[in-house]
Structure formats: structure tokens, C-alpha cells
């Protein structure tokens, strides 16, 4: 692997730390915005990847129509910063969350999502109490097997039922093709992209035949987004991890190493035996998210054969080929497996340009998991 630009650790940064290559970040923002615009779809990026107000504002500057949040706490942070068009792509239940949603709705345009009548009942009651209809996106399962009924008649029947609730307005069908990360080839990812769009459009057609118009078709995955221009009927794109990119995306060959904006900075603290080096970054820095297609938890930007093979809380164990020479005290940078999980482990990210810290980015929504 060729060395990426800004691949060294500025002396002003103590390790372990997370560095963001600002030039790569900006290119990633521009590229995804152009993809959405070229396909004629609204772009609503998912901010759970970065949880950073400054980056969300940059996304809006590049043409995003609004943002997507995973949790109510993230939405509250973004709304407090003046972002006023938010989709909450997570079901909200319980009196406490509904009370917080009510407060958010007083000053922010918010749509919610759900896939079960019990959740929608509470949302509808809230809408009636506020004398308004809360916009609702209904989640559809297109292969990830997480939330959502099956596409077609199963989801259409659910929407017909939910449409009777007076305090909500079913505005969209949504899905997340996160299972694209498990694909082995680019053509497989293309097929997943086609399936996620066609599944929602088919469900939308069934509803129209029933006299129910659900205008928004919302899809989201940084991998399948590459094919958004090929998908007929989609109105909204919700990609998130594209902002930083990571080792998982790199493995598919759809991005280059230089597109990976997030790098984990660490220092070699021990070389106890041949083929092994220990760095000062463990699971509290990298996260312990595995990737079934790749060994370990990250790879060195200078040589992808050097892999973070194992993690303890504070230690990362490197697998070092025999022809690679490292030294105790050497400062290194690694491309992590999963950028979204890494962001949430850190209070701040160091924005690097021309080998220097140009900006410190606050992870404003860190820990806002409620």
C-alpha cells in the first residue's frame, strides 16, 4: 500500500488519538454530494458516524437537505446547533423519549421512523396532543434482517394499518442495506443496491394501488450509494460512513487508501518478541468491531501487512512481517475497521492538513445514546 498523505503523526499530538485528514474529508463530502445531486435525489447524511456539529454543517454546505440521526440525544445536540431538519432513523418508545421529542418538535422539523404499531401508537398520541401529524418513515427489511417487515405485501399491510393513526402521517419507506459490507465483489454490492431500491418501490406501488401515497423512498449505505444513479424511484439517500471511510470500505476496492480520512495514531511501546509489536491503542481507541473479510482491527497506512491483530483495553498487538522494522517510540497511523465506532470513543478528533493540526473537532454527540 502506498503511504497516504498526512500519514505521519504531528509532534503536537499525544497518542493514542484519532486524526482526520481534512483534505480527504472534504473530497469525500464533495464526492457523495455530487453522487446524490447527479442522481436527482435529496441527500440526508447520517451523522452517527461523526457526531460532530462542524462536520454536519459542512455536509449542509455541500448541499445536504437535512441530516439523519440514530438517537434522540444526537438529534438534540444537532438541533441545539441550529440544524433544523432531522430524520430520527430509530424507533422511539417510552414516556421520557416522547416528552423529549415533543420539545424537539417545538423548534425543529423532525420526522421519525418505526416498524411496529406499538411504537406508532405512542407517536400518534403525541401528535394529537400537539395538534399536528408527525411525519413517519416506515422501516422495511431488505436483507440486513434488523428492523422492518418484509418488502411487498407484508410492509404494505403494515402501512395501511398505520395510516389509520390520526397523529402521524406516513411520508416514506426507508431501509438500510448495511449487509452490503458482507459482499465479496462490487457486482454483489450493485445487486444489493438494486434490491434495496426495487423492494421499496414495489411496496410503494402496492400502496398506491390501495389509494395510499407514500412519496419518499429513502435508502442509505455508503457502499450501495455508489450506485444511486442506477436506482429508479429513490428520492432520498442517507449514507453516513463515507465521510471518513474505513478499512471495511477499502477492502471492497471501491475507494483508495488516500480516501480514508480517519487514521488512528499510536506509539510503539514494546517489542517483546519477533513478529510482534505493542502499541498504546487498544479497544478503548480502535473499538473491537471485527470485519469477517479482514484480519484484525486495523492496518498501518505505510504497509498494510502490518495489522492490529489483537486488542486489550489499552494495548494493541501488531503482527509484523519479518522484513518490516519498527522501533520502540515509533509513532504510527492506522486505518481502523469501522470509523463510526471509533468516533464515539473519543471526545475530540484532530483535523490534519499539511502535516499540522489545523482544527480540533469536538465529537459533540459522543455518548448521547439515549
Image (cartoon, helix red, strand yellow):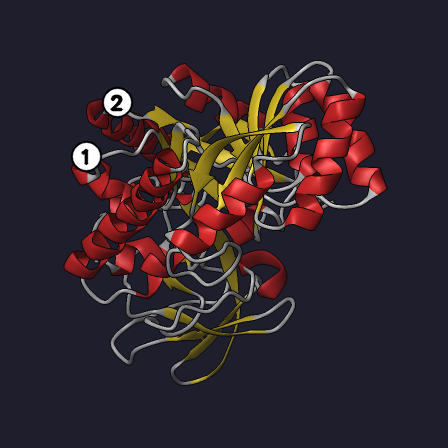
Please tell me which residue lies in front, 55 or 21.
55
Please tell me which residue lies in front, 39 or 74.
39
Which quadrant of the figure has residue 186? bottom left
| Apparent side of residue 74 relative to residue 152 in the rendered image (left or right) | right
User: Image point 28% across, 64% down: which residue?
Assistant: 304
Please tell me which residue lies in front, 356 or 226.
226
305 above or below 22? below
- Horizontal and vertical percent position of residue 89: 55, 40
Q: Which residue is mark 2?
A: 37
In the rendered structure, are the residues bearing label 2 and label 1 in contact, judged by CB atoms less than 8 Å apart?
Answer: no
State the quadrant of the N terminus.
Answer: bottom left
Q: Can you tell which mark lies on residue 229?
A: 1
Q: Secondary structure at mark 2?
A: helix
| Apparent side of residue 211 relative to residue 91 in the rendered image (left or right) | left
Which quadrant of the figure has residue 48? top right
| Apparent side of residue 136 relative to residue 38 in the rendered image (left or right) | right
Which quadrant of the figure has residue 64? top left
Mark 1 surroundings: few (<14), some (14-19) or many (≥20) residues within 10 A: some
Please tell me which residue lies in front, 99 or 249.
99
Q: CA distance from mark 2 to mark 1?
A: 9 Å
| Apparent side of residue 238 relative to residue 231 in the rendered image (left or right) | right
State the quadrant of the C terminus.
Answer: top right
- Horizontal and vertical percent position of residue 69: 57, 36
Amino acid at each position: 500500500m502506498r503511504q497516504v498523505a498526512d500519514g505521519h503523526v504531528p509532534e503536537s499530538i499525544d497518542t493514542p488519538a484519532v486524526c482526520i485528514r481534512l483534505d480527504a474529508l472534504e473530497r469525500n463530502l464533495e464526492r457523495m454530494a455530487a453522487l446524490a445531486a447527479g442522481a436527482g435525489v435529496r441527500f440526508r447524511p447520517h451523522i452517527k458516524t461523526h457526531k460532530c456539529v462542524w462536520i454536519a454543517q459542512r455536509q449542509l454546505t455541500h448541499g445536504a437537505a437535512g441530516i439523519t440521526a440514530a438517537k434522540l440525544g444526537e438529534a438534540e445536540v444537532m438541533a441545539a446547533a441550529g440544524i433544523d431538519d432531522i430524520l430520527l432513523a430509530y424507533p422511539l418508545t417510552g414516556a421520557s423519549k416522547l416528552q423529549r421529542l415533543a420539545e424537539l418538535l417545538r423548534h425543529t422539523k423532525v420526522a421519525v421512523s418505526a416498524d411496529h404499531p406499538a411504537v406508532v401508537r405512542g407517536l400518534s398520541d403525541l401528535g394529537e396532543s400537539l395538534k399536528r401529524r408527525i411525519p413517519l418513515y416506515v422501516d422495511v427489511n431488505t436483507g440486513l434482517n434488523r428492523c422492518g417487515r418484509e418488502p411487498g405485501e407484508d410492509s404494505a399491510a403494515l402501512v395501511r394499518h398505520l395510516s389509520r393513526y390520526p397523529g402521524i402521517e406516513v411520508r416514506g419507506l426507508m431501509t438500510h442495506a448495511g449487509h452490503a459490507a458482507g459482499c465479496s465483489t462490487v457486482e454483489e454490492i450493485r445487486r444489493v443496491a438494486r434490491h434495496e431500491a426495487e423492494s421499496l418501490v414495489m411496496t410503494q406501488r402496492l400502496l398506491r394501488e390501495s389509494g395510499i401515497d407514500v412519496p419518499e423512498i429513502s435508502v442509505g449505505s455508503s457502499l450501495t450509494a455508489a450506485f444511486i444513479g442506477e436506482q429508479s424511484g429513490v428520492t432520498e439517500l442517507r449514507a453516513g460512513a463515507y465521510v471518513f471511510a474505513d478499512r471495511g470500505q477499502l477492502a471492497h476496492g471501491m475507494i483508495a487508501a488516500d480516501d480514508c480520512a480517519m487514521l488512528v495514531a499510536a506509539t510503539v511501546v514494546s517489542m517483546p518478541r519477533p513478529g510482534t509489536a505493542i502499541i498504546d491503542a487498544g479497544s478503548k481507541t480502535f473499538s473491537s468491531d471485527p470485519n469477517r473479510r479482514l484480519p484484525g482491527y486495523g492496518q498501518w497506512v505505510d504497509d498494510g501487512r502490518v495489522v492490529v491483530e489483537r486488542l486489550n483495553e489499552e494495548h494493541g498487538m501488531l503482527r509484523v512481517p519479518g522484513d518490516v522494522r519498527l522501533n520502540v517510540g515509533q509513532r504510527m497511523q492506522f486505518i481502523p475497521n469501522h470509523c463510526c465506532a471509533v468516533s464515539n470513543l473519543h471526545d475530540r478528533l484532530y483535523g490534519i492538513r499539511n502535516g499540522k493540526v489545523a482544527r480540533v473537532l469536538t465529537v459533540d454527540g459522543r455518548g448521547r445514546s439515549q
